[in-house]
Amino acid sequence: MSNLKRIREEKNITQAKLSEVSGVNLRTLQYYEQGYKDINKAQGITLYKVSQALGCRIEDILDL
């Protein structure tokens, strides 16, 4: 399980709600969670928006 999915589920936020709050495309979030896209290669602004919406650090959502 990706760190993004784990943190999102811990915060009890749906993918749709995270997309709405962060402004990041829903399909993009799904691809990061499912591993179709490498979140470690995401643009800084995308990582920032998602981490702000989840109330965590950027490092927390990366899969290092």
Image (cartoon, rainbow, N blue to C red):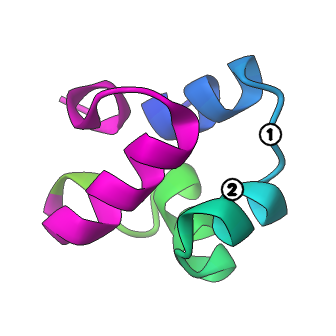
* Residue at image mark 1: 13
Please name the residue shown 32% across and 67% down the image: 46
Whether 63 is drawn above or below 17: the answer is above
**Callouts 1 and 2 close, C-beta under 8 Å:** yes
Please name the residue shown 16% across and 64% down the image: 44
| Magenta highlight on residue 35 | no
Residue 43 in percent (x, y) is at 18, 71
Neighbours of disc 1 within 10 Å: few (<14), some (14-19), many (20+): some
* Residue at image mark 2: 18
Q: Which residues are drawn in magenta?
A: 41-64
Residue 21 in percent (x, y) is at 66, 61
User: Which quadrant of the figure has residue 39?
Assistant: bottom left
Residue 25 in percent (x, y) is at 58, 81
Residue 49: which numbered mark, if any?
none
Give how far apart the Cα atoms at labels 1 and 2 are: 6 Å
Q: Mark 1 is on which residue type?
A: Ile
Q: Mark 2 is on which residue type?
A: Leu
Please name the residue shown 52% across and 75% down the image: 24
Instruction: Farthest residue to the top: give it.
Output: 10
